[in-house]
Image (tube, helix red, strand yellow):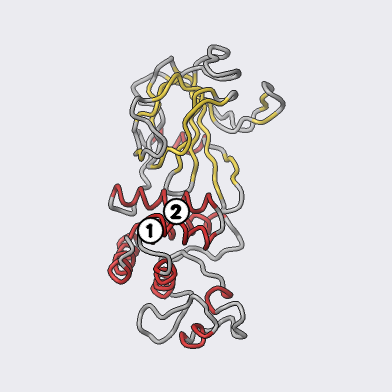
Amino acid sequence: MYQKRMELFKKMEAATAIPWYYFAGMDQYERNLRFVRKDLPEPGTISIHIPESKWAGPLNPNQKDKNPGTIAVFQGLGVDGDGDQKADRLNGEDVLAAIGRYLLTYGTDHDNIKIALWRYYGRDKAVSIITGNAKMYKEFGKLDLQEKAFPLPRRFNYTFKNTWGDARGWGGRRIHEGTDIFADYGVPVRSTSYGIVEMKGWNRYGGWRVGIRDINNTYHYYAHLNGFAKDLTLGKIVKPGTVIGGVGSTGYGPPGTSGKFPPHLHYGMYKDNGRTEWSFDPYPHLRQWERAGS
């Protein structure tokens, strides 16, 4: 599946001069949406979903039109990408060709592609995630970025149990959106995935914390750190096992507050569905990565 997708992305790069990783980034963003949204079809080889009205043209009386000529008359996006004389929005090559032509109306450079993406999705977060995906694909030169690692090196002593959903009282009643992994001060904290550092700084609840978004549009949250790795910067690309900081006990107060609880890593996972973002239980994933010995 990865090979077939890459072939299609490279084919579009050759046809449009738009780097393949932008097509890949857009496809992966929509693939992730399809996995968590019931109003979208299941993902296929190519998962970019162009609604009928955009494909055929909003004023086209035939919203299922596959005729490239009439679609063009009604200013739809649909085109014939594989030479079969049909513009089929369920055909991956046709979809990529349509997206390629759309992007070309803005340009082939990064800034103009960002403008095109914003006008297509109308959402800053979508643009950020897609360009982040593209940046990762460009860096690693491959589509398979699914490898994972346990957040603490296995050679250190640590303990954890399922604490997701537990009540928390400091700062007002709320639930615990993560799993606490208890370990000694300074034990290295590692990225569990390939991803991009999206957030780094202080929060009165989480203390020194880092947020990393992976290729599956999962946001990984690391809190109560004793500090950050020296080379950790916003926008930095990381991979499984990259050290991002150390276990600490920061938080529950203004910047620098520490020691109000035993040292531990708070690890949370969040998912975005193109509209909202919500937390989910990381405990099963942590146990799986721990068993894998990564």
Say few, some or many: other residues with alpha carbon within 10 Å of mark 2 (under 14 / 14 to 19 / 20 or more).
Answer: many
Residue at position x 66%, y 25% from top? 168
Question: Which numbered circle lies on residue 156?
Answer: none
Which of the two residues, 109 or 234, is positioned nearer the viewer here?
A: 109
116 versus 141 height, above or below: below
Image quadrant containing the N terminus = bottom left
Which of the two residues, 49 or 69, is positioned nearer the viewer here?
A: 69
120 versus 267 height, above or below: below
Residue at position x 41%, y 41% from top? 196
Image quadrant containing the C terminus = top left
Image quadrant in which you'd find residue 254: top right
Q: Are marks 2 and 1 in contact (CB under 8 Å)?
A: yes
First along the sequence among labels 2 and 1: 1
Residue 200 in picture, x, y percent from top left: 47, 31
119 versus 241 height, above or below: below
* Distance of label 2 from label 1 (alpha carbons): 7 Å
Question: Which numbered circle lies on residue 130?
Answer: 2
| Helix, strand or loop status at disc 1 | helix
Residue at position x 37%, y 38% from top? 236
Residue 142 in picture, x, y percent from top left: 30, 53
Amino acid marked by disc 1: Tyr
Amino acid marked by disc 2: Ile
Residue 272 in picture, x, y percent from top left: 55, 48
| Helix, strand or loop status at disc 2 | helix
Image quadrant in which you'd find residue 62: bottom right
Image quadrant in which you'd find residue 25: bottom left
- Seen as rendered, the residue at the extreme right is 173
Question: Which numbered circle lies on residue 22?
Answer: 1
Say few, some or many: other residues with alpha carbon within 10 Å of mark 1 (under 14 / 14 to 19 / 20 or more).
Answer: many
Residue 125 in picture, x, y percent from top left: 53, 49
